């Protein structure tokens, strides 16, 4: 799988947001949801979040830790960290290109 | 908090794995209408991306394919008066019954893509559903002798286009048997010859056989966490 996050289609954006939250350390569902909403200002629905969590777990980009009182924390795997770094690198390069073009067009 | 009713729509293996923790989330933030609709979308997504190969896609393809082949063969064996629906009147109910089955078969074939969600599948699924619903409605109109013959071809072309996209998605995922069968089915719908319905039914029957011969598990979360 060359692009483990990009080819998640409609779940790609939510998946990147979840991976970014987990890059700070393990977190459970509710914590992930509130943190994504705090960081992006956009709501992450529970159906979307668990669809993305299931896909990320299936691709071994995250792993589940033992549940504590029904709340199961998730942790970024080494594979997930690599995929997130590659995805953020692509997004960063795109943002830089876009900003540079905007600056040029303003001159 | 009692179990959220929408969660019952998720597949059983999915519920065994995620329901408890999702309930904990919903207890911390009680769901509104928007969240419930979001969960409904999640349930549909879970059915379209199952962890183990479900039996229903091959069953729908087999029953729908055989019904279509049978109806096509009956129509083929009859003299051809030029009026619409004319000689097809008797076989229309059979075609009509097969349309929703083959819609399910097309959606079911796309579950073989597992966790992948390529653009061709994302476009193909709603096209197949929309065109199949239109096709079924128009066939009902035709069966009731109310006309609608000309637009039927448009709906059938829509189904062919959606099926073609799903076939391409399967081939791109190296799932050759069902991928080729779906391409053959879509081409059969577009060919304006008398034996085309038989070919369409046969292609779906072949799609069922290839799926039964090569069930493609897409894998779930690791066994330790199930």
Image (spheres, helix red, strand yellow):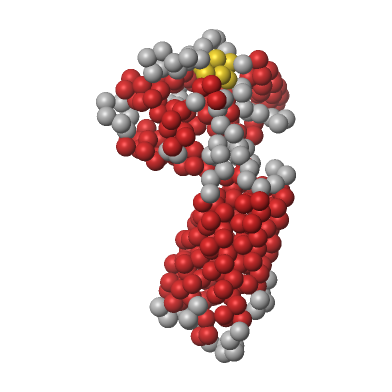
Residue B202 lies left or right of residue B17; in this view the side is right
Residue B198: name its quadrant.
bottom right
Image position, residue A98 (x, y; %): 67, 26
Q: Quadrant of the N terminus of chain A?
A: top right
Q: Which residue is depicted at the point 40% across and 78% down? A: B144
Residue sitting at the far left = B1
- Where, by quadrant of the figure, is residue B10 drawn? top left
In percent of width and height, residue A27 lies at 48, 14
Give percent across and percent down for residue B145: 42, 81
Task: Please tell me which residue is depicted at 55% across the width and 25% down the height of the picture.
Answer: B223
Left or right: B137 as drawn, with respect to B173: left
Is B215 above or below relative to A55? below
Frontmost residue, B2 versus B38: B2
Of B107 and A16, the residue lying toward us = B107
Q: Say which of B87 and B215 sits in front.
A: B215
Residue B32 visible at all: no
Residue A46: image quadrant is top left
Q: Is residue A32 left or right of residue A83?
A: left
Relative vertical location of residue B57 with respect to residue B7 in this rendering, above or below: below
Q: Where does the C terminus of chain A fall, quadrant-wise? A: top right
Do we see residue B9 in this rendering?
yes
Judged left or right of residue B199, residue A47 is left
Query: Which residue is rendered at x = 48% and y = 81% of the image?
Result: B89
């Amino acid at each position: 799988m060359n692009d483990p996050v990009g080819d998640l289609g409609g779940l790609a954006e939510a998946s990147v947001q979840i991976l970014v939250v987990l890059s700070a350390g393990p977190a459970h569902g509710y914590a992930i949801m509130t943190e994504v909403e705090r960081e992006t200002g956009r709501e992450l629905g529970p159906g979307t979040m668990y669809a993305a969590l299931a896909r990320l777990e299936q691709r071994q980009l995250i792993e589940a830790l033992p549940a504590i009182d029904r709340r199961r924390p998730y942790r970024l795997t080494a594979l997930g960290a690599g995929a997130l770094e590659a995805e953020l690198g692509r997004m960063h390069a795109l943002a830089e290109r876009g900003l540079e073009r905007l600056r040029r067009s303003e001159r | 908090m009692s179990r959220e009713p929408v969660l019952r729509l998720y597949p059983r293996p999915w519920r065994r794995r995620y329901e408890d923790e999702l309930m904990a989330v919903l207890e911390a933030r009680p769901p509104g209408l928007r969240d419930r609709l979001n969960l409904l979308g999640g349930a549909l997504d879970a059915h379209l991306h199952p962890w183990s190969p479900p039996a229903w896609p091959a069953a729908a393809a087999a029953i729908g394919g055989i019904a279509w082949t049978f109806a096509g063969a009956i129509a083929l064996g009859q003299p051809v008066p030029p009026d619409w629906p004319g000689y097809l009147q008797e076989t229309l109910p059979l075609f009509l019954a097969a349309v929703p089955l083959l819609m399910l078969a097309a959606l079911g074939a796309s579950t073989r893509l597992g966790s992948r969600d390529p653009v061709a599948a994302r476009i193909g699924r709603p096209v197949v559903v929309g065109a199949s619903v239109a096709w079924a409605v128009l066939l009902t109109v035709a069966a009731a002798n109310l006309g609608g013959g000309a637009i039927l071809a448009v709906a059938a072309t829509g189904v062919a286009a959606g099926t073609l996209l799903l076939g391409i998605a399967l081939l791109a995922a190296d799932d050759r048997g069902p991928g080729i069968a779906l391409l053959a089915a879509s081409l059969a719908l577009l060919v304006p010859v008398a034996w085309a319905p038989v070919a369409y039914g046969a292609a779906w029957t072949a799609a069922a056989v290839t799926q039964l011969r090569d069930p493609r598990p897409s894998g779930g979360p690791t066994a330790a966490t199930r």
